[in-house]
Amino acid sequence: MPQAAPIAAVAARLRSALPTGAVIDDPTQLATYDCDGLLHYRVSPALVVLAKSADDVQLAVRACVEHDVPFVARGSGTGLSGGALPHADGVLIVMSGFREIRAVSPRDQRAVVDPGVINLAVSQRTRPDGYYFAPDPSSQQICTIGGNVAENSGGAHCLKYGFTATHVLSAEVVTPDGERTMLGTTAPDAPGYDVLGAFVGSEGTLGIATEVTVRLLRNPQSVQTFLAGFADCNAAGAAVSAIIGAGIVPAAIEMMDALAIEAAEAAVSCNYPPGAGGVLVVELDGPEHEVEAELAAAEHHCREAGAFEIRVAANDTERQAIWRGRKSAFAAVGRISPDYIVQDGVIPRTALPEVLRQMGELAAERGVRVANVFHAGDGNLHPLVLFDEQVPGQGDAAEDASGAILDLCLAHGGSITGEHGVGSDKAKHMPKMFTEDDLDTMQLVRCAFDPQGISNPGKVFPTPRLCGEVPGKRKAAHPAQQAGLGEVF
């Protein structure tokens, strides 16, 4: 199929400057990149560029700017909200081959890394020196630091240590107009506006990180991990409230329901307590005497709430075995359902029992199942809506249930996202959470960075629909925009 003139011009420009194989336009190869972790949204990009350096990224962005072509950056493609969904008429800049840990300075507690560096690789490199990188998304064995920065990713240990934004000191960025600049400093409290703070979590709409300086934390003196089995999630939720209410802040406190446990058992044989309707994975870290006292107290609160079995990991091998079930849960659900949507919302922790009950009802009404695995300590839910795309209507029912879960989160004073970003998936829900003035203000910030609107367009902000147009997922630009009749603000 012949390329449109702007894409052809971008391809010619990039091929003249990059190594053979770095520019892809073969339709079969392009299909490899047609989605991220949100599998039911698929768009083949017009062109893929395999970037190996900041110069490559800058070259690609400048070519896009010159020909007014949209671009999207992608790391390992593990995002769950469609943040790296390609643009059908645009360039996908793949960063996963750009992965060198450039410098580690244990005494300054920082590391300088390429955006394609795998999250877990930072801790593996620095742990022997006594340090680690705290943010640990469940996909930390494959997700990239650049993606973590774009989505302000979290993970199990964010309850105590905060999200990625807390652990980024500075970033070199290729801006949407093709310039290269440094945001933030390594100073503890830099003067001026927090532009780096705006960039982290902007989901690629404000530019592309090409180098990230991350904060390292000291390895804790002591770590204790235990697994507690309960008859149901209500009892497990009561234990969570009791632990936090007692002033204990675990490094992590995670919950899985019966369906999530069933999936994990099928996938990795994690050997969680038989008959458990809910399990907690609790991890405590810090000074040894403090951890021992908190462990005793947390165990007490779990037993008081009805835990019928508690297993404390005696060593790293047992700790990893406890975490294996939780960390594999998202992928494991594929063992019990051909298709599923991973949703991400936040509620006040005290609303957990009521929200879980209502979630079960709304799923039953729509004829789908929901497995729950989530960060119970901070109320960050990750319901997995299970369905079979081959069954007529089930895909739509699952998407409807997924949206209703977000409505439920908002009704209980929560948010439509905790750590997975808005992306393509939840842009249509933004007006439920923000006023028109709120969204206009956000757009003004975005336009200050990207006046052409070519940096990851179609993400975060709802795209206006035509009168009478049925709401639903759209996989390309708005028809009025394509026809030149309007411009998305």
Image (cartoon, helix red, strand yellow):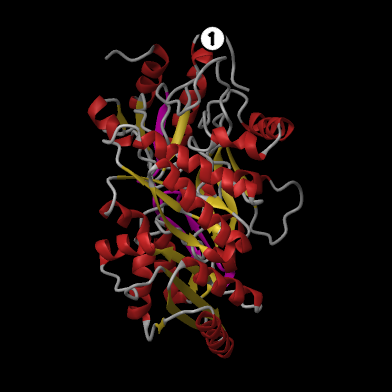
Q: Locate the C terminus and report the quarter of the image it occupies.
A: top right
* Nearer to me, 128 or 89: 89
Q: Locate the N terminus and report the quarter of the image it occupies.
A: top left
Residue 332 sits in quarter: bottom left
Residue type at mark 1: give it.
Gly
Q: Residue at x 48, y 81 (%)?
A: 223
Q: Which residue is mark 1?
A: 484
Give the structural element (helix, strand or loop) at label 1. Answer: loop
| 337 sits to left or right of 295 | left
Residue 457 placement (x, y as % from top left): 52, 28
Q: Residue at x 43, y 57 (%)?
A: 372
* Nearer to me, 3 or 339: 339
**Residue 98 covered by magenta stretch:** yes
Q: Residue at x 54, y 67 (%)?
A: 216
Residue 164 placement (x, y as % from top left): 55, 56
> Bounds of the magenta span?
90-116
Q: Is residue 289 above or below residue 340?
A: below
Q: Is residue 124 above or below residue 388?
A: below
Residue 139 placement (x, y as % from top left): 39, 56
Residue 20 makes an appearance in the image: no
**Residue 150 covered by magenta stretch:** no
Q: Is residue 366 above or below residue 20?
A: below
| 78 sits to left or right of 403 | left
